[in-house]
Image: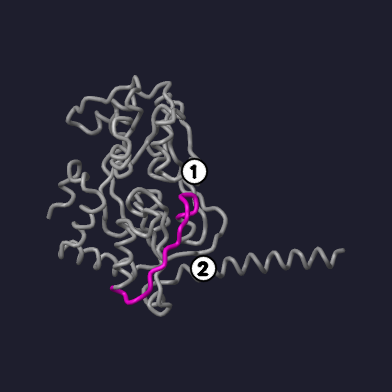
Amino acid sequence: MLRLLFLTRFVRMTLLIACLFLAQAGWSRDLNEIKQAGVIRHIGVPYAHFVTGGGDGLDVELIRGFARQLGVEYQFIETNWGNLLGDLIGHKVTLGDQGVERLAPTPVRGDIIASGLTVLDWRKKVIDYSDPIFPTAVWLLSRADSSIQPIKPSGSLKRDIAQVKALLAGRTVLGLENTCLDPKLYQLSKTNADIRLADNTVRLNEMAPAIINRLTETTLLDVPDALIALDKWPGKLKVIGPISERQVMAAGFRKASPELRHAFNRYLQQLKQDGTYLELIKKYYPTVFHHYGDFFQG
């Protein structure tokens, strides 16, 4: 019995060491290793028009083009928001009350995250970002027939955010942890709102339908998803106002892959100079210019 117990523990320890070794091996995969392997693995979550789930999208086209420039094959690795960072860096992470918490090891599945990934300070502790790809922010939306009314812009973004938060007492607000829609990022617990959290397997494009189906009074949505929702369900939704300061989206890289990140930044700059980038923005987000036209100038 003691011998069997020892063997069981030995097998478990061996498996743990093997998992850690494989995870660490993924950390060292940079530009040269990707070229040698002949494939770049794009990690993404079907979301908005960044990754449509149908084989296209803004980020899908960007990474496909990057793969062609590198002379390697393109492979898409679908995941969900709960596993997104872990699939890149080899261990799951979460945003706790004390900051970033590292969780269990997990297999490294890809080389680059591009999925409408918002640049957040806590994420910078575990990954590096490319140059900005897309402008964004977080808005509060409700049903069009809701009693909560859109704020009147004051000319000050901070005052506008304060106006929106003042409307939340007693209201249900839907958010999603470990994303840009995490209520903790915007101190919404101080508003006396009834905060409800979607499961991390929920897709962001399911947040707006939750309002329409009266599962919540309001929801947090980032700008690209909000623009799509307003177009998809005309007359059923309204924007109450901003919850966050202006943000940007970018591609995510392991900190041990600096050359890959530098190569992507050079590629992105090339697309901006030859007009390809702007054409892709017009294709997938034609209305964004009404809100963030200055981002695309120069």
Q: Position of residue 29 (x, y in %)?
A: 43, 72
Most extreme residue toward the right is 1
Q: Magenta includes 129?
A: no
Marks 2 and 1, Cα distance to the nearest angstrom?
24 Å
Tag 2: residue type? Gln
Q: Is residue 66 above or below residue 80?
A: below
Q: Quadrant of residue 247?
A: top left
Secondary element at image label 1 = strand
Q: Position of residue 46 (x, y in %)?
A: 41, 52
Q: What range of the chain is rendered magenta?
A: 69-84
Most extreme residue toward the top is 147
Q: Magenta includes 81?
A: yes
- First in residue order: circle 2 vs circle 1: 2
Tag 1: residue type? Gly
Residue 255 can be seen in this image? no
> Along the line of sight, which residue is nearer the eye, 178 or 222?
222
> Is residue 147 rendered to the left or right of residue 10?
left
Q: Is residue 45 above or below residue 236?
A: below
Q: Is residue 80 above or below residue 246?
A: below
Q: Which mark is residue 196?
A: none
Q: Position of residue 141 (x, y in %)?
A: 34, 32
Residue identified by numbered label 1: 96
Count all numbered tags in the image, as a single digit: 2
For the N terminus, the image quarter is bottom right
Residue identified by numbered label 2: 24
For the C terminus, the image quarter is bottom left
Q: Position of residue 5 (x, y in %)?
A: 81, 63
Residue plotted at (35% across, 48% down): 48
